[in-house]
Image: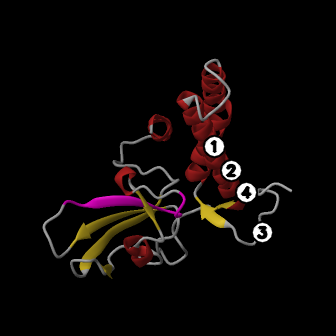
Amino acid sequence: MSPVEAVNLSQTTPVTREGHRRLIELLDHLTSVRRVEVSDRLRDARGDGDNPGENPELMHALEEQMRLERRIAELEMRLARAEVVAGGVDADGGAAIGARVRLQRLDAAAPQMEYELVSSVEGDPSGGLLSVESPIGRALLGRAAGETVEVDAPGGPIRFEILAVEDSVMPTLSSSAATPESARAGSRSG
């Protein structure tokens, strides 16, 4: 039985639709493109001898293959445990996985910040994806626009005002002149 088949599905990890799509694309790239590249590199390195102890290029290629296969197995495991969640705003207007949240720091002059709340397997703060397991993400769960949250940080507590909470899968119309066609075109460009 492979590790993926042995997964206890009661240990699911919630992921957004977009995060699930990105994991599938990455797995596809690793299995269809990177495996071929690594296989070619191994074949070329074996031309200089089959003994890894005497052939550093072969040793490096074998190590690269091992890292690649480990990464593929990890992604397969994540996908096997993934549970795609819909929405992002709960019935009370509070933030959940999939919500886009706009914040303003209250205790320091700082620009507004906007993040999508995602699972830990999707988190990338520099890309605007904030894990709900991070201190800020945890503080935002279930909170609505107009509320203030406080997050413990190494330098002391940080306070944020929640300016907006929206479902990230729904297009946002920035003006009343927007049409359904322009909303669809905008969603294709991002």
x then y, percent, for residue 80: 73, 57
The tag on residue 8 is 3
Between the residue at mark 3 and the residue at mark 1, the CA separation in whole angstroms equals: 25 Å
Residue 80's disc number: 4
User: Quadrant where the C terminus lies?
Assistant: top left
- The x, y position of residue 109, in whole percent, is 13, 67
Disc 1 or disc 2, which is closer to the eye?
A: 1
Neighbourhood count class around disc 2 (C-alpha, 10 Å): few under 14, some 14–19, many 20 upward: some
Q: Nearer the viewer, mark 3 or mark 2?
A: 2
- Give the spatial CA distance, label 3 vs label 2: 16 Å
Position above or below: 66 against 38: below
Q: Tell me the kind of residue under disc 2.
A: Ala
Precedes in sequence: disc 1 or disc 2: 1
| Magenta-drawn stretch contains 120 | yes
Q: How far apart are labels 4 and 2 at the CA level?
A: 10 Å
Callout in the foreground (4, 1): 1
* Mark 3 residue type: Asn
Q: Which residue is mark 1?
A: 66
- Residue 73's disc is 2
At label 3, counting other C-alpha atoms closer than 10 Å, the crowd grade (few under 14, some 14-19, many 20 or more) is few
Q: Is residue 186 above or below residue 146?
A: above
Q: Residue at x 35, y 49 (%)?
A: 174
Q: Secondary structure at mark 3?
A: loop
Q: CA distance from mark 1 to mark 2?
A: 11 Å
Q: Are marks 3 and 1 in contact (CB under 8 Å)?
A: no
Is the Cβ of the residue at disc 4 closer than 8 Å to that at disc 2?
no
